[in-house]
Amino acid sequence: MKVLKFGGSSVASAENIEKVVVIVKQKAEQSNVAIVVSALGRVTDKLISAGKLASTGNEEYKHILVELEERHLAEVRNLIPVSAQSSVLSQVKKRLNEIDNICEGVYLIGELSKKTLDRIMSYGELLSSLIIAEKLKAEGVDVALKDTRELIKTDAHYGNANVDFDNSNLLIWQYFNQSSRITVLPGFVASTESNETTTLGRGGSDYTASIIAGALNAEVLEIWTDVSGMMTADPRIVGQAYPIDKISYGEAMELSHFGAKVIYPPTIQPVLERKIPVWIKNTFAPNDAGTLILENGNESPGIVKGLSSVDKIALLSLEGSGMVGVPGFSRRLFDALSRKLINVIFITQGSSEHSISVGVLEEDVIRAKTVVDSEFAFEISIKKVEPLSVERGLCIVALVGDKMRSQPGVSGKMFSALGRNGINVRAIAQGSSEKNISAVINEKDVRKALNVLHEEFFETPTKQVNLFIVGTGNVGGKLIEQIRKQQHFLKEELRLNVRIIGLANSKKMCFDENGMDLENWKEKLLEGETMDMRQFIQRSKALNKRNSVFVDNTASEAVSKIYEELLENNISLVTCNKIACASTYKNYRKLKQLAMNQNVSFLFETNVGAGLPIIGTLNDMVRSGDRVRKIDAVLSGSLNFIFNNFKEGVSFENVVRQAQTEGYTEPDPRIDLTGTDVKRKILILIRESGVAMEMEDIATDSFMPADCLEGTVDNFFAKLKEHGQVFDEIYKRANAEGKKLKFVASYNEGKAKVGLQAVDRDHPLYMLDGKDNIVLFTTDRYHEQPLIVKGAGAGAEVTASGIFADIIKTAR
Ligand code: ADP
Ligand code: ASP
Ligand code: MG
């Protein structure tokens, strides 16, 4: 058995009730269900005002009743098919007539007792349950409607009746024992032993559902409302509030007692005893996870579970010299208040015993003052005690969480956050349990206080990462796409708000200080200003954003020349451009040093092996004290692609052309074919290993005829064709020996070289597909077997992802 409760807003309109029907139908497929419904949204308020107006002889009440009549009849017409409408309309009208008659009686005698008000209020739920049951029937669902007044028995404390659980549990159990699978019941209403209608307190439909769930030992109590769970704070006050996924009964009770209206406080009691889970769900977003209230709900992370507030609080203080050392003052104070059924929300006592203060609701102040002053009339007359002092216009803000008691520093953090924001704490209140820390503050500060505390305890500040990207070609374009797709995740999971502030390619540049809309960056760039590198840098500097990162997706020497200026201006650098790191050792060191001094990042993982974690791995080894002895590597995805595709019957020229068009080579493929690119890469690895080396120190074993290297790129292709024979020969020789051609870069104890090698089957470099790269690090720690990094080492997508990973690293 499941018990489902739908609140006022869930059943506020025909449209909403349709949503309820979908949920009920789905649940009813799985098990028996009891459906408890509230009155249509705001109907209870209207009924109360109709009753009150009638009692003061104000005929306005009739308008309210007309409005209620129209609303309920319209719901029937909207929900029930015409063929079935008339019987439902007449049942609804019968109920509406009863309200009219009662209100007329109230109007005539000019008096509204609590008992009569309960009768009037009960019609909200009686009507809504009737309409919803009929709607379900019209949908072909086999439902019974049961008047809860016949099941829940209470005392005669009208307006807020106390449940007789023994009696009610039995009645509920007996009824459900022989009822149909689906029962609709009005929430909120109950009755006395002599069948007088009572109500369970405002918001009491939750309680009705919980009483039924408890009596039937239901598998779950589902509270369907208009928010996606119990939230970290009242969402109407704290915009950043979010649903809590799990919470303990104690915590939920504490939060609701301290103002979290989403469940009526007494609701927890009946389900707690039987450990029935309570699931708070959103009728309007049924797929949202909602909040689970469970016995061990406090095991989920988080010391502070939620914030809440109670407003319209007054502080009552009893003071006087006569109180010192005289026992019994507090007892007399509390007895007096309890005689008048005044709820004490908190107690604070000064250490001097000279005074005692309690917090009560403002509505109880007058009664409290009267009863307390009369209790201490004698002491007041002899001036041993002052008349009760009253301070109004206060409210309580509370932090709630089971684990707070074992966690030092929570209250310190709370009060210092309030203090820093100029919020004066009138009193520190001790709640009824150690589950809460509360502060009494002025009502005018409540919104600010809740937001300040929410920020302090629930919001990890989001870090902004402001990007200035140059280069929007193959790699740059993919990078922007990846950022666009990942932006939401980064914000949610890593609290990183990665935004592109400046964007440029060789022709255009554009800026958006608030972060560009990445859905249409191409159009924005096209409409942008003419690119001027100087201007771009000037603007990036002038914007002076925290966490600025310059991203170089080019292979341009000119761009690499501005790194120094950027780092000097505290702008981090992420680049796939190898030129700077492969320039003179002096320059490379200078840039690294500068980044360190300025406390910014200079990251270039994609300089070697695209997105493969080669430099990062090497850095980790070196930083942890390892020493590189030897490096063997195939570092050119381009050359690997070329030599893997170069076979009998395919011309070398065509393979190179294909590699170029597919983006596997540099725009000028000679940079790859001459080994320059590979030399740069091995040089960077050598330098990152901690060895000072220059490009010229690396020996090259070139396989390219010299005239291929002269003139334009077109000229180069022409020469490749001309020398076709030379390349075919190289291939045939290797093939005849069962070897494969690999362009290998190696470093061994201070010496480095690059060149084409024919490797045989046993060599670790032999099995290397497509455009893959491989690096073997032999180090002091990895000396028997090298540490190997292998995988796709070229291509726009993987290069972009390597750049992206570096960008994220700068922020973390
Ligand atoms: P229903 O009519 O479904 O019983 P209520 O209006 O009684 O719904 O309770 C839901 C409302 O409680 C939400 O719309 C929200 O404005 C308010 N609320 C206050 N504090 C919280 C909180 N901590 N978490 C969720 N909702 C809260
Ligand atoms: N209709 C009642 C009220 O407004 C009970 C409820 O909705 O829970 O207080
Ligand atoms: Mg409610």
Image: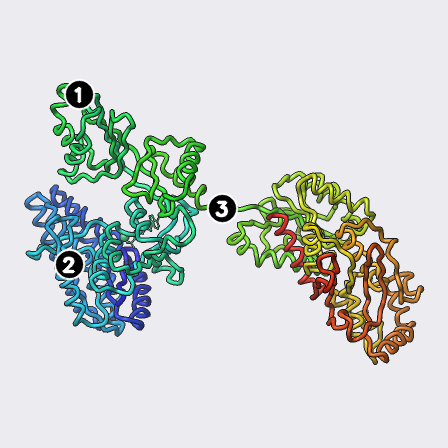
Q: Earlier in the sequence, mark 1 or mark 2?
A: 2
Q: Position of residue 596 (x, y in %)?
A: 69, 42
Q: Earlier in the sequence, mark 2 or mark 3?
A: 2
Give the SS element for disc 1.
Answer: loop
Q: Earlier in the sequence, mark 1 or mark 3?
A: 1
Q: Position of residue 68 (x, y in %)?
A: 20, 54
Q: Residue 19: which quarter of the image?
A: bottom left
Front in this rendered view, residue 755 or 370: 755
Q: Residue 208: which quarter of the image?
A: bottom left
Task: Please rate how many residues cluster around mark 1, counting C-alpha atoms within 10 Å: few if below 14, some from 14 to 19, many from 20.
Answer: some
Task: Please rate how many residues cluster around mark 3, counting C-alpha atoms within 10 Å: few if below 14, some from 14 to 19, many from 20.
Answer: few
Does ligand 1 reach within 8 Å of label 3's beta carbon?
A: no
Task: Please rate how many residues cluster around mark 2, counting C-alpha atoms within 10 Å: few if below 14, some from 14 to 19, many from 20.
Answer: many
Give the SS element for disc 2.
Answer: loop
Left or right of 304? Residue 675 is: right
Q: Which mark is residue 384?
A: 1
Q: Position of residue 215 (x, y in %)?
A: 20, 62
Q: Which residue is mark 3?
A: 460
Report the quarter where the N terminus lies: bottom left
- Marks 2/3: CA distance? 46 Å
Residue beneath the point at 38% across and 39% down: 447
- Residue type of the residue flagged with mark 1: Lys
Q: Position of residue 44 (x, y in %)?
A: 21, 51
